[in-house]
Amino acid sequence: MFLVRCLRPFSTQTAPLRSRDAPGAEGGRVDITLTSRRLASLCAALTCSLFALAVRAAGAPPGPVNPAPTAKDWADLAQLPDWSGVWFPESWTITTARHPPAWRPEVLKDVEALKALEKAGHPKGL
């Protein structure tokens, strides 16, 4: 909240002077725009300094974030299956022809009847 108050613009506000001998004292009041800018700059510099101190206090990381791979890492990688190449997904008809679903006995006779109709030239959309 203090930082918000420091950075709030004071372009039209004036403040009474404590001393009448201060420069820019006309009628006992002075424009504090310049003063608020100095205060905002001081707040920004103080914030940056505190952030830099916090970063420095955290210190450097204990070691490399991503260490170089070792020979054991490459050996473990070599044991994985080779997934390279181009993969073509099979169509549903090829997949079901190779691996037909396990139908329940009461449904199996309906499926067989539909397959017979399809072979006869009257497909019903199985």
Image (cartoon, helix red, strand yellow):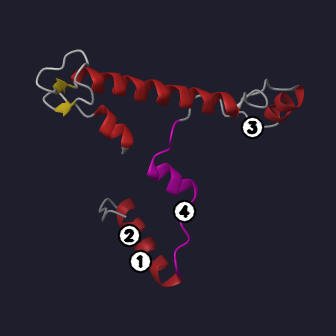
**In this rendering, the label closer to the viewer, 3 or 1:** 3
**In this rendering, the label closer to the viewer, 1 or 4:** 4
Q: Label 4 neighbourhood size at 10 Å, few (<14), some (14-19), many (20+)?
A: few
Q: Quadrant of residue 86?
A: top right
Confirm or deny contact between disc 4 and disc 3 (CB under 8 A): no
Numbered tag placed on residue 110 in the rendering: 1
Give how far across and how far down residue 36 sits, in percent. Answer: 28, 27
Numbered tag placed on residue 28 in the rendering: none
User: In the image, is 87 to the left or to the right of 6?
Assistant: right
Does the magenta portion include 71?
A: no
Mark 3 or 1 closer to N-term? Answer: 3
Residue shown at 27%/30% (left/top)? 18
Between marks 4 and 2, how big is the CA–CA gap?
15 Å
Residue shown at 39%/60% (left/top)? 119
- Residue underneath mark 3: 81
- Residue underneath mark 2: 114
Residue range highlighted in magenta = 88-104
Confirm or deny contact between disc 1 and disc 2 (CB under 8 A): yes
